Structures are given as C-alpha cells and as structure tokens.
Amino acid sequence: MPRVASLFLPHLAIERLRRVERMRGMARSTALPDAALQPRLAEPIDDDPGACSVPRGGGWRPGARWARDGAIIGRPSQAELDALPAHQRPTMREMGRRSEHAEHPFKVMPSDEGRGTTSAPSLGWATLWGRSTVLVLRTGQRDVITAACPLALDLGLRPGMAAAHARALVADLDVQDADLDADRALLDRLALHAARHWTPTASVSGEDGLWLDLTGTTHLFGGEQRFCRRLLAFLKRLGLTAHIAITPTPGTAHALARYGKNDVTLLPAGQEAQALADLPLAALRLEPEALASAARFGLERIADLYPMPRGPLARRLGLRTVERLDQARGLIAEPIIPVLPTEAPLVTRQMLEPIGTPDSIAQVISDLVDDLVIVLLRRGIGARTVLLTAVRVDGEPQRLVVGASRATRDARHLKRMFSLRLAQLEPGLGIETMHLVVPRHEPLGAEAMGALLATSRKGGDLAPLVDQLSARAGDAALFRLSSDESDVPERAARRIAPMQAPTGWPVWKRPVRLLRRPELLSNVVALMPDHPPRRFTWRRQDYRVVAGDGPERIHGEWWRTDREKWATRDYFRVEAEGGERFWLFRRGDGVDPDTGDLSWHMHGVFG
C-alpha cells in the first residue's frame, strides 16, 4: 500500500531569517565585554609552588582570591555579586570552594520525540526583532510581500500585499529583502537529509515543503505516528514550524498538510474523496486562471466538482483541473521525482547550429561519451544507466536510455549501445543541445591484465553481448533461472538478471519444461495408493504408461495459507508408449481425505 507524506513549512523564509539572526545573537553574546577584559588586582608571587595550598598557620588558601582580596579591600556583598552580569560573576571556586555542582550532561538534552526539556530559553518573535518583520521581493515597479512573521500576520499583513500598503497599515514595520535562493538551498538540504536518513525517495514540493515516499519505511521508526513526532521535533530544534500529512496519494497529502486542521494527519486508504470534500479548490494546486473561472461559476469546495461531468468540467476549468482531481483521489498516478544524494556525472554539448542528420548526431554522441568516460575514470565509477537528452529547437526534449548489465566505462561499448537505439530519436527541425547523464552508477576499480590477454584462461566477458541483445530484444527477453527456497515445484524457480549467478539446483530430478500451472488429467487408471497411473488422457490425447517411478511426496507450505496445511502431492515420473516422459502428481496420499481429492495433474515434461 503506497504511503506518501507531505511536509509543509508555512514560515520557511521568515524562520530561516530568524535562525540566522539568532545565531548572530548567540555569537555576540559569547563575546566578552570591555569590563571583563580589564586586568585584575595583582596577586602575590608564590615563593613555594610545591607547598600545600592551605598554610599551617591559618589564613586564606591561594585559590580563594575573592575571599583574600575581600579581607584587604573589602569583600563584596551578595547584592553586589547578584548585580553583576552572568559572565562577570566569580565562580564558586574563586569564592573559596574547591568544587562546584555540575548538571548531569544528559539531563537537558531533548528527546527524539520532543518530550524533553532544554536549558536554552526560547526566543519569541517580539524578543528577537522587537517588531513585525516582512520579506519583500521586487516585482515590476513595486515591492511585494513574500513572507511575514506571526506578529505581522496578526496585524493583517499577508503575502502578496504591496510593501507600500503594509507600511501604511503598520508604522513600525521591519522590511527586509527576500532571498529565494537561500530558501531553496535550505529545502534542498532538507531533501538530501531526508533521502539519507528517512526514506530513499524524497523530493522538493514547490517552495515550502517536501514530499516523502514512506512506503515500507515507517516501521523502522516505530510507525507513522512516532515518525511524525520525531520529524516535527527535529524541525523544531532547527527553529522551523511544520505540518505533515501521510496519505495514499501525493495530492491528498499536499492538500491536507496545507489546509488541514491538525499538525499531523494520518489518512487511511480509501478515504481520499471524503477528506478532500470540505477543502477549498486551491488545495488541488490549480492554476490562477482555473481558480478565477471556478469563482465565477460559484465553485468553492472540492466537493462541488464531484457531481460534475468530466467534459463540461474540463471545458470550464481546464483539463489540468480534471487531472489534479484524479491524482488527489488516486485514480491516476502522480510520480515523485526523487533527489539524488550524490551528484550524477553530467556532460553537455551546445551546438552552434541545429543538427538533424544521423551522422552528425552520432558524432556528437561519440564526443559526449568520450567526455563522460573521462569523468567516470576520474571518479572511479562505472555506468549502469546512461541517459541521453537531446533538446530540439522547439524546446521538446528527446530521451534515450541505455543500460548495462555490469558497471562499465568502455567508450566503444557505450557508443555501440547508443547506435542501436539512434533510430528512436526524432530531431524534428534540429537539435541544439545534448546532455549525457549517468543516473545510476557503481564503483569500478582496476581490472587484472590477465583477463585481457588472449592466453588467459578466464572466459570472455558476456556483459557486452547481454547489453546488445537486450537493446535489440528488450530488457525482459534475457534472463536466467535460479532455484528458490521452496519445496513446491512452481515456487522453486525464479527469474534473475542475465549476469547474476544462480544459487544452485536441487539434487533430485526435475523436468526440463515445467507448466505454468498444473493441468487436470482425465480417464486415469491407477492402483492405490502408491502406484503410478497405467493410462490417462491429457489435452484430448490418450497415453498408455509402460514404466513409472515414484512416488515423491511433497507437502504444502502450511505457513502460507490454511488450504496448504494438510495438502499433499505424490509425484511420479512416467514413460508412455511413444517414448514421452512426463512428470505428474496425485493430490492426496490415498488414505486421509483431508490431504487431497485424489485428482491427477500434469506438471512437467522431460526431454
């Protein structure tokens, strides 16, 4: 069951600025003031540093400077000590004590679920800046608000409002420039952190959130509820306010995270339409033109779109509206393009003039492959998947993907693979830019020279042959068979990749051809309970058995289904008069009725 989480950061830009200002304030608070830099009173020289710190004749020990100095110049009172700043107050050791109490090092650390306490005081918006703060961006001939702190929002300032209008409403308003690049960089860092620590599939969602594909991953964190608590606690430590929704579809998660009533929303499967019914149409990520058209027709909620026919709805609000509605309800898929924790190798060629002939395209691909091999060699990796993107003059990209069964950086082999699929490119009016990127790669070290010599006993590498055959016949056409850990014959074999080594085969005899599913036999004559059949009919043809061997008893896998708890099969290898050799079985052991109905089935053919 797919589970997608949408993480919404409503005050990302303003909280990023808040975090920067807080770090600057902490840096200023750690600096020593001028009074602390003044030299203290001169201390007497210790003539005997190896002697005991407490003299026998009494008096102050050398470490108690404040007590000793107080006896000479007047000891400061407790009120005077309390009036001093925290960083100028004398330590307990200077006051005459040999040691002072220290807090437990793990007492003030917050827990992962946000239930702990922290010793650092929380800085509110008013104590941080002292007034309302908004971020503006220059749009045309005016400044427009892009983000506002909670104090400004309470005063009626909203994103999209003109800065001049905001200044007229709030006199003491702090206006700062927005930094969209810094906000995007913070989102990218969060997405990379999510891909490394939370889920392999994480993506940036717009300008204020993330998408996380949590399918099959939340059990690692103790469930969805516990994962959400830990995630919100992590973002709180970063100074970010967040809302999260986990639903079966990305569209529903996006809508509930931004327009839902709770900070954490967990929606079971099958309730998407009911959960979206009362939300506004803006929750579907519609275009402004579609929202304006919906307002003219009196459509305000998503539930208003449910009874409308698809044709009129597409004509009035656009085909994109119908697509967004179906994506939110799970009727059509909405892919999530994940971020990659590592930068994929990329090479680019920009043509002076558009090209369209096969020879010129092949030459540019050859140059790109040569450049890519240098990058792969420098990074010590080999390509498993190479993506070619050819951008035409009209802006339409053409893509070709070639895969390798084994990591490679052989330029000749990669050029051969692209030449086999070159006919799939449609240059149109011409191609002006070509990119070559490796989205999937693996470490590739040095290869022993003995494998490259003609006299070497090592067999030739089959990877180039497998890649070329796959390019011609398709990726699913080539495979190997390997055994699987199961006693049931139809489950004991599986397909593996052509270059993957099989795990082995059972020691008992098995037919060369195994039917996809057992076929029922008719007109079977056999002695019960341990004899093979003497004659049978299969596929409207009668067979007379001249020799047989068996039975080989196989029990069902009781841990799968209750039907296989007592199921039993007795397999026989038989030979017919015409020389055909078959592998057939009888359901049941011939004694207990619960083991089977004593029907005969054909399961395989020898030879």
Image (cartoon, rainbow, N blue to C red):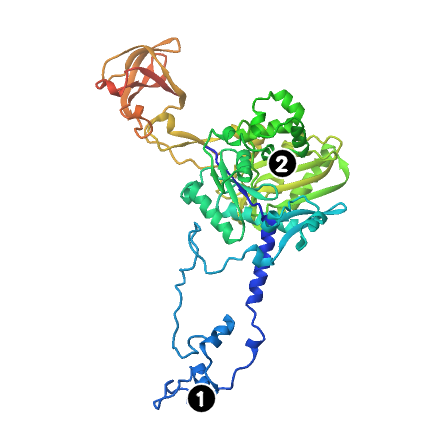
Along the viewing direction, whichever of 551 and 254 lies nearer the viewer = 254
The residues tagged by marks 1 and 2 sit, at their Cα atoms, a distance apart of: 85 Å
How would you rate the neighbour count of disc 2 (Cα within 10 Å): few for under 14, some for 14-19, many for 20 or more?
Answer: some
The residue at the far right in this view is 353
Q: Could one spot residue 202 in this view of the protein?
A: no
The residue depicted at 40 percent of the width and 79 percent of the height is 96
| 296 with respect to 77 (left or right) | right
Please tell me whether mark 1 sits on a helix, a strand or a loop. loop
Residue 17 lies in quadrant: bottom right
Please tell me whether mark 2 sits on a helix, a strand or a loop. helix
| 76 with respect to 149 (left or right) | left
Q: Nearer the viewer, mark 1 or mark 2?
A: 1
Mark number displayed over residue 46: 1
Residue 309 placed where, x, y %?
60, 20
- Compare marks 1 and 2 and give the one earlier in the sequence: 1
Along the viewing direction, whichever of 515 and 170 lies nearer the viewer = 170
Residue 470 placed where, x, y %?
55, 31
- Type of the residue with mark 2: Arg
Residue 515 placed where, x, y %?
40, 20
Is 135 situated above or below 551? below
Residue 173 lies in quadrant: bottom right
- Type of the residue with mark 1: Asp
Along the viewing direction, whichever of 158 and 547 lies nearer the viewer = 158
The quadrant in which the C terminus is found is top left
Along the viewing direction, whichever of 44 and 397 lies nearer the viewer = 44
Is 521 situated above or below 152? above
Which residue corresponds to mark 2? Answer: 416
